[in-house]
Amino acid sequence: MIIINYFRLEGKVAVITGAASGISEAAARLFSRHGAKAVIADIQDDLAHKVCKELDPTSTTFVHCDVTKEEDLENAVNIAVDKYGKLEIMYNNVGIMGAVKSNILDKEIRIRKSHQYQPCRYEIIALFISTLLIDPDFAPCNISH
C-alpha cells in the first residue's frame, strides 16, 4: 500500500520570490495547500495581496521584494523569521526584465557574462544572497570562468 503524506510541508516556513504570478504563484498555492506558511515576496504588490487573500491569511504574508536589492531579500528573510519563528525553505523562481543597475555578484561570486548564463543569473544572485542571510557562515566556492 502506498501512503502519501499530503502535509509533508505542515508547519514549514517558506519565502517564495515572484509568488504574485506564474510558477511561483502556483508553488505558493501548493505550499499553502500542503500546510506551509508562505511569505509571498514580489514587486507586484496588488497581485501579491490578491494571492495572499485567496490563501489562508493566517499562514500567508506579503512582503514587497525586489530580488536585485539585497536589502529587500534581507527584509523578506527577517519578516519570515519574525512572524513565524524560523525559515526552512527559500523558493527562488523570479524573472527579471531589463538591466540591473548594480552587479551584486561582484561582492563574492563571479559568473561568466556570456549569453548562456543570463537566463539563470538573477536566480543565482537571489539564491546566493538568501543563503548568506540564512547562514552567515556559508563559504561559497569561487566560481569564475
Image (spheres, helix red, strand yellow):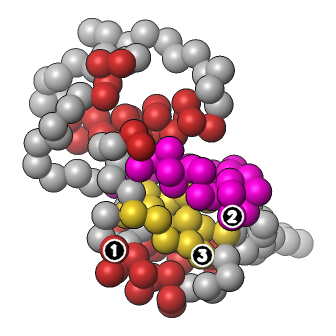
Specify the amino acid type for callout 2. Lys
Segment colored magenta? 72-94
Q: CA distance from mark 2 to mark 3?
A: 10 Å
Q: Separation of disc 1 and disc 3 at Cα?
A: 14 Å
The spot of residue 108 in percent (x, y) is: 40, 17
Asked if the magenta segment contains residue 74, the reply would be yes
Task: Report the disc number at residue 83.
Answer: 2
Q: Position of residue 3 (x, y in %)?
A: 85, 71
**Quadrant assignment, res 120:** top left
* Front residue (pair 128, 119): 128
User: In the image, what residue type sits under mark 3?
Assistant: Thr
Q: Which mark is residue 60?
A: 3
Judge from the rendering whether residue 44 lies leftward or rightward of residue 130; answer left or right: left
Mark 1 highlights which residue?
45
Q: Residue at x 76, y 57 (%)?
A: 85
Q: Is disc 1 placed on a helix, strand or loop?
A: helix
Q: Quadrant of residue 42?
A: bottom left
Q: Earlier in the sequence, mark 2 or mark 3?
A: 3
Q: Is residue 57 left or right of residue 123?
A: right
Locate the C terminus and report the quarter of the image it occupies: top left
94 sits to left or right of 12: left
Pointer 1 local density, CA inside 10 Å: few below 14, some 14–19, many at least 20: some
Q: Secondary structure at mark 3?
A: strand
Instruction: Where is residue 1? Give x, y as percent.
Output: 88, 72
**In percent of the image, x 30 and y 70: which residue is there?**
44
What residue type is disc 1 on? Asp
Q: Residues within 10 Å of mark 3 (few under 14, many from 20)?
A: many
Q: CA distance from mark 2 to mark 1?
A: 19 Å
Asked if the residue at tag 1 contacts the one at tag 2, i.e. Cβ–Cβ closer than 8 Å, the answer is no
Q: Is residue 109 above or below residue 99?
A: above
Residue 37 horizontal side relative to residue 107, left or right:
right
